Image: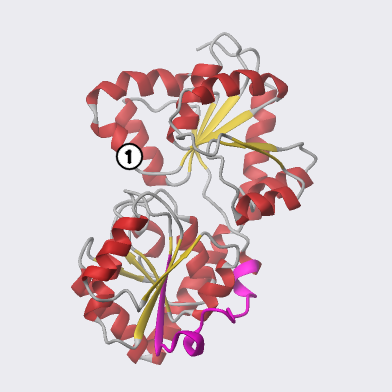
Amino acid sequence: MVDLLPRLQDLGHKVSIYAFSGEHTPLTDQLSTAGIDVILGGENDSVYHPKHIMVLRQLMPKFDIVHTHNTSPQLFAALANIGRHIPIVTTEHNTENRRRKLFFFRPIDRWMYRQYRQIICVSEPSIANLQAYLGNKSDKMCVINNGIDIQRFTNATASLEYNHKTLGAEHIIINVAGFRAQKDQATLIRALHLLPRTYHLLLVGDGVYLSECKRLAKKLGAEQRVHFLGVRNDVPELLKAADVVVMSSHYEGLSLSNLEGMAAGKPFVASDVDGLREIVAGYGVLFPHEDPNALAAEIKKICNDTQYAATIADRCQQRALEFDIRTMVSQYDTIYQKVMHQGAYQS
């Protein structure tokens, strides 16, 4: 959103964002500074609290288009739109989620997706899995790859706060991801435990599994080498300070952190799962899902072989160039124009 919304604003759209979480972060501050109207939910409210439906009922009529991302906004906006027929669009970011494993959610999801005028999937695996789950290939579905601000990552300078000298590290590994069930920082922490003490790990992000990962690092005796940095607005600089970028996940849609890591000009290593495999194969390095031994071996090989590392980094950066955010913004704008020219929608 930080990269996308200001660019939509530059096209002449008036843009607001309603974040169910009421927490002020460096990212919400960036959006406010860019002139985006940021509306926050209650600080102590769950993103699944039904009060958001009533808030949306009040907010949505003020807008020409409402675009949702992630599970609870998808459902709550559809519910808030009953009887309203406000044009709503959603983006499906993943290839799977926990909800799809619960049979009683399927009829709810089928109803929910029917309420949307356009369903944007971030990758081919994402749209294929959603079509299989819903049992149809609606012409309302399309693929728009996520994009990033390439120049912001290729032109960044290394962090002065977290680098080899300040950490006392010979090699730095970095992972940028929320601490949630989809991600797998635990495998990365276990891999670090298998590496020499001169290797340090930067974990950027926040989430419900943060405490669990901190406990794991302490249990393995690696707490002095695992640095939990929280949510940051200097990710490009942190990536530039690292030797290896790792994305260890159980599944992805089209990970922005994946593309950002590849754009930074660093060797990129990812778990061999849907949503990562399609972007990384042939460019970066894939390791078997949940295999800390294989991951540790790949990291060590990259750090010990400068020519090998340089080759991977160059391939990754060239791959990232295919996902410039300017293309994504143009395609989103085309969808909005199409939706606005459609007649009154009936589900």
Name the spot of residue 37 as percent of width and height, x first.
72, 39
Question: Could you say which quadrant of the image residue 196 lies in?
Answer: bottom left
Residue appearing at x 22%, y 61% in the figure: 290
Residue 77 visible in rendering: no
Frontmost residue, 202 versus 122: 202
Is residue 197 placed above or below 11 in the rendered structure?
below
| Magenta-colored span | 152-175
Is residue 134 placed above or below 308 in the rendered structure?
above
Name the spot of residue 228 as percent of width and height, x first.
42, 67
Frontmost residue, 112 versus 233: 233
10 Å crowding of disc 1: few (<14), some (14-19), many (20+): some
Left or right side of 152 for 319 = left
Q: Which residue is the site of mark 1?
A: 97
Name of the residue lying farthest toward the top: 83
Question: Could you say which quadrant of the image residue 343 lies in?
Answer: top right
Q: Is residue 173 magenta?
A: yes
| Mark 1 residue type | Asn
Residue appearing at x 31%, y 61% in the figure: 213
Residue appearing at x 44%, y 52% in the figure: 254
